[in-house]
Amino acid sequence: HKRTTYASLALCIAFFSAAFIFGGVLLSKTDVNQQWMIAINQSVSGIDSLWSVLTQFGEGGVALLLLLVFTRFSRNGTALSLKCFLIGSVLSPSLKAIFAHARPLSVLDAGLIHTIGYPPTAANSMPSGHSMTAIAAVTLLCLCLPVGSKFKPVAALLVVFGSLVALSRIMVGAHWPSDVLAGGGLGILIVCLAVQWEQFQPWSNYLKQSKSQWGLMLCELGLVIYLFRLHAETPASQLAIDVIATLGIAGLMSRLSLLRKKEMP
């Protein structure tokens, strides 16, 4: 019965993911895509700092650092985080090269789009990597939450937050709505692939070993250094990056403390 329920759930998630991906691809071929881009981009003004902060959470290094900090207490959260990062690092640039869609700023008149920071203009718009990363991270965090009705509000807030991060790519002028839809669907698919990978080739037990924990700690340190050296486009985004890096330091120190206790005779 449990296997049947799991198979049905996996099928529903795969269908949901495919609907978003193909929906985004189809939308990219219509004039509606440009109309929605302009309408959504200009619908909310006066909160540029908020969108500037939110869009930072779709950056790959940011998401991986936060996942390593917040999923390490779940049974296989660290393994899934690493596998999602590896899969996404291959799929996103590959699909961008295949589709080679032009960015909004290289197609529309500059006066039609409200930009925040310095959105890219290269022909690699589809899918949105930030949207993919944000939705994958939120989906994974929801999977790592303890089972129980009291955690449903947390899951709902995570979904809203991830959706806003994805939406921020339109608000800053970097992506079309089609890119965001396809990126979101791809993010869900990446988590599904990571879960299947972990079932057939588990990393969880290996990652619990001391030498692996030292390696993860060095990975977190590298990501913290990367974030502190990252050039932010706006003061708000710089503040967000600094706060995230500080959280990373706290997570690193916590991991180090637990590791030392574990190795004490």
Image (cartoon, grey):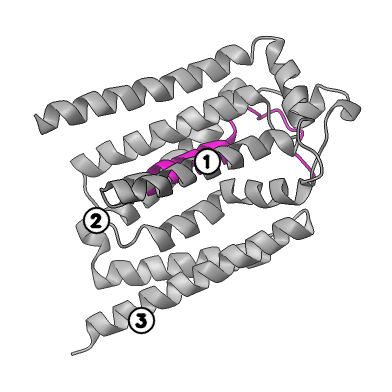
Rendering quarter of residue 114: top right
Q: What residue do we see at 29% from left, 40% from top?
A: 195
Nearer-the-camera pick, 4 or 126: 4
Residue carrying label 1: 160
From the viewer's perspective, tell me whether residue 250 is left or right of residue 37. left
Give the quadrant of the N terminus: top left
Residue carrying label 2: 75
Is residue 188 placed above or below 83 in the rendered structure? above
Q: What residue do we see at 60% from left, 42% from top?
A: 165
Mark 2: few/some/many CA within 10 Å (<14, 14-19, 20+): few
Q: Secondary structure at mark 2?
A: loop
What is the span of residues highlighted in magenta in the rendered image? Answer: 118-141
Nearer-the-camera pick, 213 or 238: 238
Is residue 41 placed above or below 149 in the rendered structure? above
Residue carrying label 3: 257
The reply to whether residue 226 is visible in this rendering is: no
Q: Earlier in the sequence, mark 2 or mark 1?
A: 2
Three-letter residue code for mark 2: Arg
Q: Residue furthest bottom?
A: 265
